[in-house]
Amino acid sequence: MTSKRDNPFFSLEYQTTLEDLGSEYYDEVDAAKFPQHILKFRNNDLLKHLGLASQDVDDIHFIEAFGKFKKIRPFLALSYHGYQFGEYNPFLGDGRGFLYGQVKGINGQVYDFGTKGSGKTPYSRGGDGKLTLKGGIREVLAAEILHRIGVKTSRCLSLIETGEKLWRGDEPSPTRSSVMVRMSRSHIRFGTFERLYHLKRPDLIKKLLDVVINVYYPEIALDSDRYGLFYEELVKRSAQLVAHWMAAGFCHGVLNTDNMSIIGESFDYGPYAFINTYDPCFTSAYFDHGRRYSYGNQPLMIRTNLEMLQLPLMSVISPKVLETGISQFSYHYENAYRKAIFSKLGLTKNVHQESGLLEATIDVLRTSQINYHQFFIYLIDNINKSWWKEPSNILEKIKLPAANWVNWKRIYNKSLNEYSSDQVNNIINNLNQFNIKTPLLKSKMESLWDSIASHDDWEPFYQLIKDTK
């Protein structure tokens, strides 16, 4: 696996946005050395955002950069604190990863390359700083599936198996190891600001906030009210993000403030899961005994985290302005959630808002306990022009509890008739765009992992990635 071509990753336009902030925000670290470097996943789709053609990037280029970790810029383990399950933890930071580098994409935006499983840092707290192969596979899949249906998310650039055996309490051990590189818009977290508040450094809070606004909110950077506008926009982005999770049937699992991005992007997927049926009490993290981060609690937890972020931001933004910003959370969430559910139903016009369709859909999903994702797949597989003529024709072979099922069909028929029956292909395209045809339920994930663990058969994994395109 050799290449005579220069490694294109080393010629990217690297930025020093975070590096220039200074050592108050990070520790410089080195990567671990691994006994093997077996490239298992490379995200060719991301290369185009960097101005690279996939045919010009060899597998060995990924391994040199993101397995053997040739250093282009200093590797930075970022410092942060966070509220974990409601309790403040001042002993956090990048414990098994670092910022490999920041690069400018062809759209002019800055992207972070962040590692996971790259070895110990000053924040490892006794851990080995490594990542299990199963954990890496799970993050690759979560990011690709969510991206496919329009959720703003980080994505994995590469996953390399490293040949070590790891011991974990939540996986049969010893288990295989990996190192992953995540590409995101930013690795700055709510907890980055919370740490600076804990250290009583309002000067560093303002310095960081100015960088965040200039780099990630450039449209307001020159506005005299930019600090208040920043918080309003963050509230909006965060509300929309959790609305899209809820519509996707996605439960993040650990919504601590150190897992919250300062730009409203989804990242850092640990014990996540997609729901089987509509169940607000569904909890994906086995250690979340109080169901704090259950599926139905996610909007409340995101809002709570935004409220806790106000404490460090008060050194720059007045409490009144912050309160105005957070007061819009429910409005943004409800609008985004309604629009997302309508999109899953194939509908993209605003005329459905007062139709009762959202409420009727949730009522059917809740009372029938039909598989959440299969319900929408049934629509994709069966929609036809007869649905426009008569409500009873809609999913006529699907038998669900009578009263609310008949009501839902009536409302959905009325909504369909806002479109011409000749637009059925447009509806089908919408259904395909906003729904997961092969949902990553627990049984599916375990089946994928069993193929890899037992036979080193990666074909089901690659097929699922292909299905998300």
Image (spheres, helix red, strand yellow):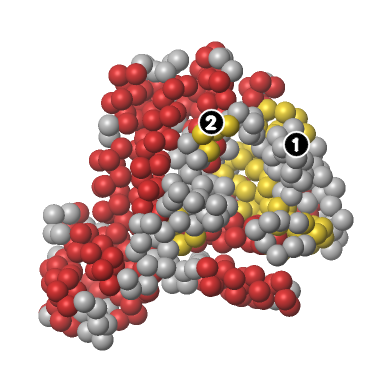
Residue 338 at x, y percent in the picture: 26, 53
Q: In the drawing, does residue 34 fall left or right of residue 101? A: right
For disc 2, the neighbor class at 10 Å (few under 14, some 14 to 19, many from 20) is some
Q: In the drawing, does residue 91 fall left or right of residue 29? A: left
Does residue 56 appear in the picture of this structure?
Answer: no
Between 240 and 70, which is closer to the camera in this rendering? Answer: 240
Does residue 383 appear in the picture of this structure?
Answer: yes
- Quarter holding the N terminus? bottom right
Decide: is 100 above or below 18. below
Q: In the drawing, does residue 441 fall left or right of residue 307? A: right
Q: Residue furthest bottom?
A: 397
Residue 265 at x, y percent in the picture: 48, 43
Between 139 and 462, which is closer to the camera in this rendering? Answer: 139
Residue 272 at x, y percent in the picture: 52, 56
Disc sitting over residue 88 in the figure: 2
- Look at the numbered disc 2 and give the secondary structure of its residue: strand
In the figure, residue 135 lies in which quadrant?
Answer: bottom right
